[in-house]
Amino acid sequence: EDKVVQSPLSLVVHEGDTVTLNCSYEVTNFRSLLWYKQEKKAPTFLFMLTSSGIEKKSGRLSSILDKKELFSILNITATQTGDSAVYLCVLRYTGANSKLTFGKGITLSVRP
Amino acid sequence: NAGVTQTPKFRVLKTGQSMTLLCAQDMNHEYMYWYRQDPGMGLRLIHYSVGEGTTAKGEVPDGYNVSRLKKQNFLLGLESAAPSQTSVYFCASSYYSGGVGYTFGSGTRLTVV
């Protein structure tokens, strides 16, 4: 059973649109929730969220975590074709070796 | 440029053949990981290492072996390849455990026929 569920699985928008990507999870004993962007190759780090209700922002991207309702969202405003990618939601568990559990990803396509 | 280098980038194997994927990092990271990525499955942890000379099983370790003889290298071996091991393999490293500071390699696309 998936512990990290992302929705929608895929999304097509036009340049300039605003998108919201969702990530829900089932576990509570995690240290942080991370968002990655994966284009053709390796995932690249976007955000790390550890506290509920505190928005992280980087340019047109922002993200927030709700530990009570067990979800996170990633917002992208004024989308550009370069935002086309797979967006991964990842849980980092507590513990000495705190491994990561990845969601299946959301494929975002931004059309000109 | 500092980072994680994976070799090879592409490989086609016949069922039953063996091969080793090499991951090298030059950032003096303690932790190294091997993941596989399959369509609709997300990244799944195969094996990981928390330091030179150590290895541990991840989520999907069967059919794979690993070695970390040197701190900078983490090898993933397939002793007898199976079509189910067709996947994209990513190596990652981090200075400390967890997702911040993870650096991923560019991936190895392996096809087993």
Image (spheres, coloured by chain):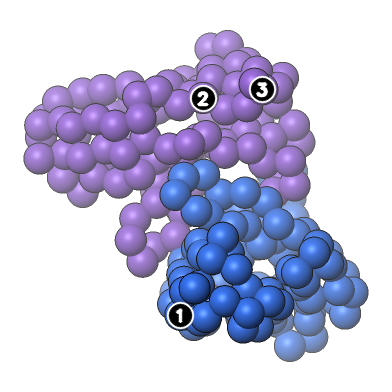
Chain colours: A blue, B purple
Across and down, in percent, residue A17 comes to: 62, 83
Residue A13 shows up from this direction: yes
Residue placed under numbered mark 3 in the picture? B2
Dots 1 and 3 on the same chain: no
Which chain does tag 3 point to? Answer: B
Across and down, in percent, residue A103 comes to: 52, 66
Which chain does tag 1 point to? Answer: A
Figure check: A44 above or below B75: below
Is A20 on the left-hand or right-hand side of B81? right
Check whether the beta carbons of the residues at disc 2 and disc 3 lie within 8 A of each other.
no
Residue, x 47% and y 74% (percent of image)? A111
Tag 3's secondary structure?
Answer: loop
Residue placed under numbered mark 2 in the picture? B5
Residue, x 61% and y 53% (percent of image)? A100
Tag 1's secondary structure?
Answer: strand
Residue type at mark 1? Answer: Val
Q: CA distance from mark 1 to mark 3?
A: 35 Å
Residue A88 shows up from this direction: no
Query: Given this view, does label 1 or label 3 mark the residue nearer the observer?
Result: 1
Query: Given this view, does label 1 or label 2 mark the residue nearer the observer?
Result: 1
Residue placed under numbered mark 1 in the picture? A12
Across and down, in percent, residue A1 comes to: 44, 74
How many residues crowd around disc 1 within 10 Å: few (fewer than 14), some, or many (20 or more)?
A: few
Q: CA distance from mark 2 to mark 3?
A: 9 Å
To which quarter of the image does residue B95 belong?
top right
Residue type at mark 3? Answer: Ala
